Image (cartoon, rainbow, N blue to C red):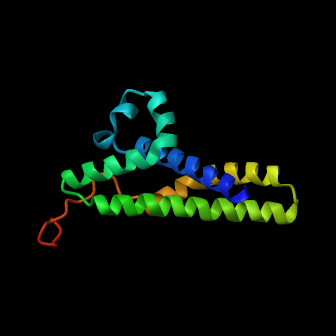
């Protein structure tokens, strides 16, 4: 039960972080739902982010950029979210001993830490194209 709840919290926080990543994009690289300020699509992305991330990686590769780097960033973000949500939960559980408060603090703490995790794990928007010969464009 405890592990499932922490996985669910980390899952939703990863979706929220990816929506924040989309909103932080420079104007040239913003997605349509960000430009149109469609909140429904943003909230839906919180829950279906694996599909959105797979499509984004596909689009990155079609644009000549590294889709693999994008997917590795998303996986790293999800792993970091789970790790820190679990650490926060266990710390609160050790200090206070009440699991519901631990879940709440883990959710809020993970939400505050998500911009940092996103900045460290996700690639820069509009990165350099990948040369098929293994050399980067200058």
Q: Is residue 132 left or right of residue 60?
A: left
Query: Could you tell me which residue is drawn at 62 percent across and 50 percent down?
Result: 8
Residue 59 shows in this picture: yes
Task: Please identify the residue farthest to the bottom as the structure is shown.
Answer: 134
The outermost residue toward the left is 133
Q: Is residue 114 above or below residue 40?
A: below
Residue at 48 percent of width and 28 percent of height: 40
Foreground pick, 133 / 75: 75
Quadrant showing the C terminus: bottom left
Q: Where is residue 134 drawn, in percent x and y?
A: 16, 72
Q: Residue at x 84, y 66 (%)?
A: 94
Residue 138 seen in the current view: no
Residue 54, horizontal then vertical, whole percent: 35, 51
Tally of numbered discs = 0
Q: Nearer the viewer, residue 136 or 41?
A: 41
Residue 30: x percent and y percent? 34, 39
- Where is residue 20 drawn, in percent x and y? 48, 44
In the rendered structure, the answer to whether residue 30 lies left or right of residue 92 reads left
Task: Report the residue at 33% width, 33% height from top.
Answer: 32
Image quarter in which the N terminus is found:
bottom right
Left or right of 136? Residue 8 is right
Q: Residue furthest front?
A: 1
């Amino acid at each position: 039960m405890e592990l499932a709840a922490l996985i669910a919290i980390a899952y939703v926080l990863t979706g929220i972080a990816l929506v924040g990543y989309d909103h932080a994009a420079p104007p040239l690289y913003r997605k349509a739902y960000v430009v149109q300020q469609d909140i429904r699509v943003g909230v839906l992305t919180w829950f279906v982010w694996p599909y959105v991330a797979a499509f984004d990686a596909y689009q990155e590769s079609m644009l000549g950029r590294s889709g693999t780097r994008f997917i590795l960033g998303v996986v790293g973000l999800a792993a970091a979210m789970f790790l820190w949500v679990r650490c926060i939960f266990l710390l609160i559980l050790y200090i206070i001993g009440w699991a519901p408060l631990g879940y709440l603090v883990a959710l809020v703490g993970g939400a505050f830490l998500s911009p940092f995790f996103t900045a460290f794990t996700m690639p820069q928007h509009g990165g350099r194209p990948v040369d098929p010969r293994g050399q980067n464009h200058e």
